[in-house]
Amino acid sequence: MTERITHHIDGGKTPGRTRESEVYNPATGAVTGLVPLADEPEAARAVAAAAAAFPGWRETPPLRRARILSRFLELLRRDMEPLAKVITAQHGKVLEDARGELARGSENVEFACAAPQLLKGEYSENVGPAVDSYAIRQPLGVVVGITPFNFPVMVPLWMCANALACGNTFVLKPSERVPSAALLLADLLLEAGLPKGVFNVLHGDARTVNSLLHQEQVQAVSFVGSTAVAKSIYQTGTAAGKRVQALGGAKNHMVIMPDADLDQVVDALIGAAFGAAGERCMAISVAVAVGDAVADALVKRLRTRIQAIKVGPGDNDYSEMGPLITAAHRARVQSYIEQGVSEGAELLIDGRSLRVPGYENGFFLGPSLFDRVTSEMRIYREEIFGPVLCLVRCQDFNSALELVNRHEYGNGAAIFTRDGDTARTFANAVQAGMVGINIPIPVPVASHSFGGWKASLFGDHHIYGMEGIRFYTRLKTVTSRWPAGIRAGHNLNFPVL
Ligand code: NAD
């Protein structure tokens, strides 16, 4: 049955008005839902609901906001299974991976529950005679979150947990390919006691986003998605006077030194390159082997391990890797594989021939491995966002580091080594926002912050953790003199102590 999906505005289900888009189950290829694509009037409505809810939410004491978030956290845990099932049904990732996404996403709510502590200001007594000074962080107002398809729950939670804790009201524009999980979050927030209009879900596409970016009352925009869109949202949003953080695409390298534990490396690479079918912004898509001996040994081990990956629908206990998000995205990834072959890379494992019995219409693509990839090739330069691992051979550490640093993207980078000097030099010199040492996917925990460098992030703030608190608040510094009756005297000069 095809479900008609609604928006969630001002605490209620709101049907779409005109345009719609199909939602698929990527494992079967079947259309399972129709999602509305909002235009300007609906965007204005969602923002108006959030704006109307702002004064009350702003005045709600941080401890009360935190209590609601704490109840929300309990409800997320209670509904972990139905949420994971919705993620798998629309995204395709295997259930265990969906549970992992929920667990990591929930940590951001746990962090935000410390709102009273996080929002504590600074106070300096006696900065002048009878003069005190204090600094406070105030909420911005209505903020918008625009999220990608690959983490239907975690990325919205990266944003809304802190935004709400700080006293903002929120309009979430989830990916139109995975719209339903956001609605479950909205229901759980209401059940937790969040007042109507504080959190709204508006479905849509580029046109919808454009309408949101031009709403006068929107104060800030958090975006996570591909680099081209991130850059354009940053430019449009900031030109319209909004605060914007826009996280983009990636091409994450893992440098493998000759002294690395190769068993550990292979385990790490299998998960980091092929987990979620490579549809992760922190996936490792480039393995950089230092020395041909390491490269040859790696290839030997990877061949058997990659061929053993169990690809199938995400809703069973057997599959390790699910399908890609759409048929169009699979065709795009396939075209990169063709491109790699024509550019002269060695295709050691070709995932294009994979068939999953009983799921012939699903958007499956097997894992692929390229060897002897060079930095001029498109498969090296561009983000593929699929289960394709490129192996680049470098002769020494310095050339490996230079290779990573020359790349356009700088989201994450990892090194596997047993040598502390090399690891420290890498962490110090690598041009990436998140670094792993013997850790393949260094996604920071919720009390730190997530964000890349170079073309992987536009804006001044990383997302979540203390950076999230800073992004979703405005600093105000108050200088006051008491008692009010004190005479300071008349002086036309700049006040000094
Ligand atoms: P996308 O850029 O196509 O879409 C992201 C969001 O932007 C969606 O909500 C979509 O509706 C909207 N959108 C799409 N085109 C738009 C346009 N022209 N104007 C305005 N809005 C538009 O990304 P995706 O395919 O959903 O997600 C995959 C991408 O996201 C990859 O590039 C991946 O690396 C990136 N990503 C980055 C991070 C990170 O933290 N840096 C995390 C997850 C995903």
Image: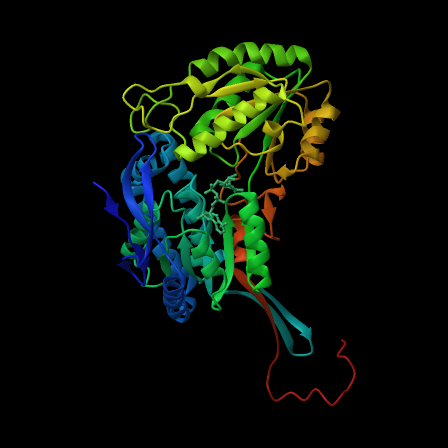
Of 137 and 357, nearer the camera is: 357
Q: How many marks?
A: 0
**Quarter assignment of residue 15:** bottom left
Q: Residue at x 63, y 38 (%)?
A: 410
- Figure quadrant of the C terminus: bottom right
Examine the rendering and report whether any part of residue 436 can be seen.
no
- Figure quadrant of the N terminus: top left
Examine the rendering and report whether any part of residue 251 can be seen.
yes
Residue situated furthest front in the rendering: 342
Q: Residue at x 38, y 21 (%)?
A: 311
Q: Position of residue 41 (x, y in %)?
A: 38, 65
Of 218 and 232, nearer the camera is: 232
Q: Residue at x 53, y 11 (%)?
A: 301
Q: Residue at x 49, y 56 (%)?
A: 117
Q: Is residue 25 above or below residue 17?
A: above
- Scheme of colours in the image: rainbow
Q: Is residue 54 above or below residue 129?
A: above
Q: Position of residue 66 (x, y in %)?
A: 39, 56
Q: Position of residue 289 (x, y in %)?
A: 64, 19
Of 239 and 268, nearer the camera is: 239
Question: In the image, is 217 to the left or to the right of 452?
Answer: left
Q: Position of residue 182 (x, y in %)?
A: 35, 48
Q: Is residue 155 above or below residue 470?
A: above
Residue situated furthest left in the rendering: 1
Of 219 and 268, nearer the camera is: 219
Question: In the image, is 98 to the left or to the right of 343?
Answer: left
Question: In the image, is 279 to the left or to the right of 317?
Answer: right
Q: Is residue 145 above or below residue 392?
A: below
Residue situated furthest right in the rendering: 493
